[in-house]
Amino acid sequence: MLLANPQYLWLLLLLIPIVVWYVMKHARLHAAVHVSSTAPFNGVPRSWKQYAVHFQFVLRILTLATLIIILCRPQTRDSWRTSSTEGTDIILALDISTSMLARDFSPNRFESAKEVASRFVSGRETDNMGVVIFAAESFTGVPMTNDRSLVSNYIHDISMGMLNDGTAIGDGLATSINRIKEGKAKSKSIILLTDGSNNTGNVAPLTAAKIAKKMGIKVYTIGVGTNGTAPYPQQNAFGGIEYVRMPVVIDEATLKNISDMTGGKYFRATDNKVLNNIFNEIDRLEKTRMDVKSFSQTEDDFTLWAAIALALLALQLLIKFTVLRAIP
């Protein structure tokens, strides 16, 4: 049994002087009858009601003790459980170039990628994770952390226009490598999601891939976009945004080379369902076994003690008003 407030057990010491007072009081109490001789009473046994008087006091003491235990807030907790689970270091590198607003996904590639990535993060309870965003430049959104809420909330808050427009796949991968190399897990992986081809930046994608290979970092690459054409956003003459169908161009050869070189895998996501399945497959592939000791939530549980207190009080009152009832 666990107690939330075990310090209240000291109140049980107060019962000691109460018991001492009771014993001393009844030691001085005795009935007096003036008779010439007590010989006729020598063989008279003690009445069971004498014991009932003392038993009534014992019930009161036990009731007080039970109330003190309730004041200590008894609690229950599920047993400790050691389980074998997975844990690794993972960086999510997300392309946030304007082309990610293409509407071949619902509502678009950008929001769909954020939703699936956030759900992926929520399911990786024992991982250290980080987020890198890239367009014409790259930026570390969240360094390596095991705070899943922080990572998930950041992904939710990513907005288009945070970086200059363009697609610097090499820079995004290089920044991800710099972040994940600080991780402590033996298994390190980068999930790089993009919908285009490298057209800017300071680091070539394959150069970054060679660095990742040297450091033992696997890179899973995901090309996002349907086959054929898709409605892409374009600025019209009035400064507004209109959607024009254009061919979907993804540098799959480079993305495949990156994944093959680092021991990862390349995926092509053509719609929301496929993208979700890809993250589920990566979730199954990227596992590292480790032992985790856990326990469930602690809850107050004083029902039994309250029932005992009520039963003791009820029994004491029953004896008082029946067996030991006083007649005026």
Image (spheres, rainbow, N blue to C red):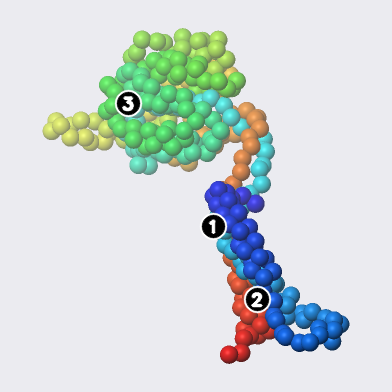
Answer few, some or many: residues within 10 Å of disc 3's Cα (few below 14, many 20 plus, some between 14 and 19): many
Residue highlighted by disc 2: 315
Q: CA distance from mark 3 to mark 1?
A: 60 Å
Spatial CA span between label 2 and label 1? 22 Å
Q: Quadrant of residue 216?
A: top right
Name the residue rendered at 38%, 33% in the picture: 154
Residue for badge 1:
71
SS at mark 3 in the image = loop
Kind of residue sitting beneath label 3: Ser
Q: Quadrant of the C terminus?
A: bottom right
Badge 1: few (under 14), some or many (20 or more) residues near its Cα, within 10 Å? some
Pick whichever of labels 3 and 1 is earlier in the sequence: 1
Marks 2 and 3: in contact by CB < 8 Å? no
**Nearer the observer, 291 or 166:** 291
Q: Is residue 258 left or right of residue 166?
A: right
Write down the quadrant of residue 45 in the picture: bottom right
Image coords of residue 215 (percent x, y): 55, 12
Q: Residue at x 59, y 47 (%)?
A: 296
